[in-house]
Amino acid sequence: MKKKLLSVLLTVAVTASLLGGCGSKKDDTTTTTPTPTEAAATDEATATPTADATGLAYKGDLSLMHFSTSEESQGNGGSDGFRTMISEWEKANPDVKLNQNVLANADYKTQIATLAAANNLPDVFLLQGMNTKQWAKDGLILDMTQIIKDSPDYAQYNQNAFYPFTTDGKEYGLPALTGGTCTVVVYDAAKWKEAGYDTFPATWDEVLKAKDYFSKQKIDTIAFGNGGQWQANSTFLDTIGDRFTGADWTHSLIEKKGAKFTDKAFVDALKFTKDIFASGIFNADFNAVTNEDAREYYINGSAAAYIGGNWDVSYIGATLKDSNPDLYGNTKFAVLPQPAGATASEGTNSTGMGYAVAINAKLADQPDKLAAAVNLAYKLTGADFSNYVASNYALGGLTKVENVDLSKFDQFTQDFYKYSYVDSKPCEIYDSFITGAVWSTLNADLQTMLNGQMSPEDVAKNAQKSYDDNY
């Protein structure tokens, strides 16, 4: 059951196969979203069109395609904020008829790809990072580099968030919805206390020891669902991969500077993934059930922990707050434990913003209509949106917000805010970059590997071939 809950966190779902990836290039000094106390133009770039003194000069239709359905907005801070900004913009611009095509996330990904293939994209839409390079090359999306620089909120933008939507030095979208993690361990602190752990274990060896206790209790140690194929990549491998390879390898792969899927460090990450899923700490049907199914195992008490993304945290919180207040109060959050032999990074979790508001390149020849599209893009990603999601959900968007007041939120929300925005050591979400063809190959092979029917080396070879052929 879904309940609207203003104090529960959710950012946009991100995946390669069904949902969108989220990502931004990280360094050690910049966060992707505000903390509680703070919340390159080219000659070819499209100049920002201007409206007349009384508002938008354009009067006519403007098409917008997105996936913030009314159902998704229940408890989903990003989608609720997105829909609220659309409504406010429509009221402020009555002479523009905004024609919305609103689809469920999985349907959106399929339909937007079909429209792109036909060169028939909407005027304004949500762009996934992994599509940026190809769609820019095909001339489908508007170069927004100068438009972004001319935004009234530009000084408050988190510049790292643009990385997935940048190619050849040009920026093709305003990162949208909310930023957060795609990899989090959700655990029942009371159960783990009974097993002898004050906090979730820092190493997988300790998790394996805990398995003996939970097996005697006839519950799973960790629930996970990879039935949709994307989950093992988006909510597990990208973080585990970073622990073995480090960020430089990932950026080299994205920027085609020499890294390969067949590099030993990445193969080692695959080997670890294969072994840990064969260890018995996860539910036996992990490769057949979805993340939605697996999180129910945590909710109903048949698993002591769950690994998923921020969207799962929102659902878990919204469900437990009324149905099981004790488990709601005992639910805590942790990073993935450190694999033995992984020395490239430690304590990271995959984090970013998976979609951006983009504009059809055809609008470059229609300046008044383009001005309306730009105005809408600013509204959907600017200060109004960020202030709304910060004050109502303790979430962060593209535009930084200062002095987020966490005192009005419950402990669950405060704890997840701290995990996501304060203590976070971000790494990239793989499927926010490169191209969907590569991830389709890798995701399918990962599932086969986890079924024990494929070697890590062959998974890496197939991924590299798809990379060479498609990227």
Image: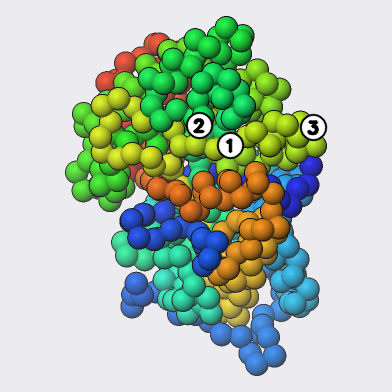
Please name the residue that numbered disc 2 is placed on: 199
Residue 294, image x and y in percent?
62, 24
Regarding residue 447, the answer to whether it shows in the image is yes
Q: Is residue 279 above or below residue 382?
A: above
Please name the residue that numbered disc 1 is placed on: 332
Residue type at mark 1?
Lys
Distance (Cα) linking label 1 and label 2: 9 Å
Please name the residue that numbered disc 3 is placed on: 323
Residue at 39%, 42% in the rendered image: 348
| Secondary structure state at the residue bearing disc 1 | strand
Q: Quadrant of the C terminus?
A: top left
Check whether the beta carbons of the residues at disc 2 and disc 3 lie within 8 A of each other.
Answer: no
Regarding residue 437, the answer to whether it shows in the image is no
Single out the residue that lies furthest toward the top: 216
Q: Residues within 10 Å of mark 3 (few under 14, many from 20)?
A: few
Residue type at mark 2?
Thr
Q: Nearer the viewer, mark 1 or mark 2?
A: 2
Check whether the beta carbons of the residues at disc 1 and disc 2 lie within 8 A of each other.
Answer: yes
Q: Quadrant of residue 214?
A: top right
Q: Nearer the viewer, mark 2 or mark 3?
A: 2
Residue at 71%, 58% in the rendered image: 408
Check whether the beta carbons of the residues at disc 3 and disc 1 lie within 8 A of each other.
Answer: no
| Secondary structure state at the residue bearing disc 3 | helix
Q: Quadrant of residue 202?
A: top left
Distance (Cα) linking label 2 and label 3: 24 Å
**First in sequence: mark 2 vs mark 3:** 2
